[in-house]
Image (cartoon, grey):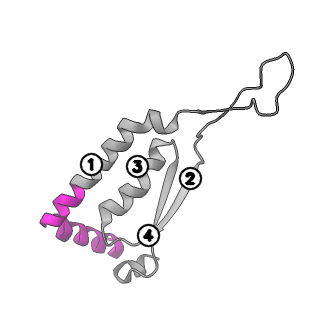
Amino acid sequence: MNACFVVWANSIFLFSSSTDGVAELEKCASTCEYFAQHAEEFLRPISQDMSAGHAGPKPPPRAFVTFNPLGVILAVMPWNFPFWQVIRFAAPHLMAGNAGVLKHASNVPRLRACG
């Protein structure tokens, strides 16, 4: 079995058996629910006023800002709060249609061997 997986799995097991682990999972769930419930509002196109300096018989041009997916987004982060670290990065980006790649920070001693 991969040593990196064993370290990660053991830290999750120890972490999730505590009261803090349950609180963190609840925080993660509420964050996911928040972004799911507000996705349409957050991603709605924003109309821009283009009438400044416009003259003539035609109506002013119309413009709006849209929020399109960027693609794959990299997150380099410590894993001291394994679930929350991932959710606070992933929830808004997945809501917006992006994909994500997670990499542990090099200063995390127990995961340094995973390189």
Q: CA distance from mark 3 to mark 1?
A: 10 Å
Q: Start and end of the magenta stretch?
A: 1-25
Q: Amino acid under label 2?
A: Val
Q: CA distance from mark 4 to mark 3?
A: 15 Å
First of labels 4, 3 by sequence position: 4
Q: CA distance from mark 2 to mark 4?
A: 16 Å
Label 3 sits on a secondary structure element that is helix
The part of the image, by quadrant, that contains residue 14 is: bottom left
In the picture, which quadrant includes the N terminus?
bottom left
* Residue assigned mark 3: 91
User: Which of the pair 84/1 is nearer the observer?
Assistant: 84
The image's mark for residue 29 is: 1
User: Mark 3 Cα within 10 Å, few/some/many (few <14, many 20+)?
Assistant: many
Residue at 59% x, 48% y: name it.
71
The image's mark for residue 39 is: none
- Camera-near label (3 vs 2) is 3
First of labels 1, 4 by sequence position: 1
- Camera-near label (2 vs 1) is 1
Q: Does the residue at mark 2 contact the one at mark 1 (Cβ under 8 Å)?
A: no
- Left or right, 110 with respect to 19, comes to right
Residue at 42% x, 81% y: name it.
112
Residue at 74% x, 31% y: name it.
50
First of labels 3, 1 by sequence position: 1
* Residue assigned mark 4: 77
Q: Amino acid under label 3?
A: Ala
* Residue assigned mark 2: 72
